Image: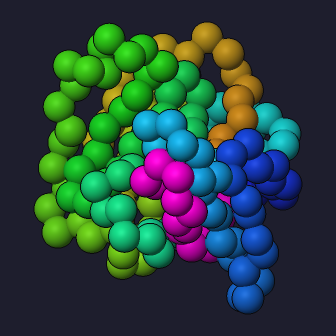
Amino acid sequence: MIALAIAWAVTHGTLQVGVLPGSWLLSSDASAGRYSEGTMISEDEVELPYRFELSWRRLGPEAGRSMHVVVAGGVVLVKAGKIAFYAYDDATFASVEWKPIAGHEVHADHVVVVTQDRRHVEVQIDGALVATYALSVPRVRTHVGIGMKSAPGYRSAIYVHDVTVTHLQ
């Protein structure tokens, strides 16, 4: 395993360095559409397979709106007590059932670990395997990211810390 130094770029919202080393406050963009969004993406691509570990918690009131982890070929979505995977296909996603995560509270700090190879995305939260998604990824490198949705027209935030990306050999 090789730990990677990651620089982050913001695609939606704002990103502030947190008080503690290795922490950030990611805020949504207050867009007036269906939702506002905050997303940070790795400036450089990461080689598959990888392990993406982070700790996060929602600071705003929108427990029913998702926080997300961007991976090759899709987005892992986590909201209060539920998880789903969006593979950039609106029609298919409309028929997807969110899988329950027992006792998951978005305002509490959680350790999220996403492991991806060219065939699967595996998600652990607080050390428990909560989901595995079959996904065929033809490319060997991808940008990874962290984000959240919030109410339209409002700024909200998540606190993110202890982010590591490790290349698995």
Residue 131 appears in the figure: yes
Give the x, y percent position of residue 49.
61, 35
Q: Eyeballing the image, is 14 above or below 95? A: below
13 inside magenta stretch: no
Q: Residue at x 36, y 33 (%)?
A: 85
Residue 168, located in which quarter of the rendered image? top right
**Residue drawn at (84%, 43%) of the image:** 43
Q: Which residues are magenta?
A: 146-167
Whether residue 106 sits left or right of residue 147 in the image: it is left
At x 26% / y 60%, what residue is drawn? 80
In this view, the residue farthest toward the bottom is 19
In this view of the protein, which residue sits in the foreground, 123 or 20?
A: 20
Image coordinates of residue 112 in percent, x first then y, are 45, 60
Total residue callouts: 0
SS assignment for the magenta stretch, majority: strand
Side (left or right) of 14 relative to 56: right
Provide residue 118's location: percent of width, then percent of height: 55, 22
The image quarter in which residue 143 lies? top right
Q: Can residue 22 be seen here?
A: no
Q: Is residue 140 left or right of residue 83?
A: right
For residue 152: magenta? yes
What is the quadrant of the C terminus in the image? top right
The residue lying at 21 percent from left, 58 percent from top is 81
Q: Position of residue 102 (x, y in %)?
A: 14, 62
Quarter of the figure with residue 22: bottom right
Is 126 above or below relative to 99?
Answer: below
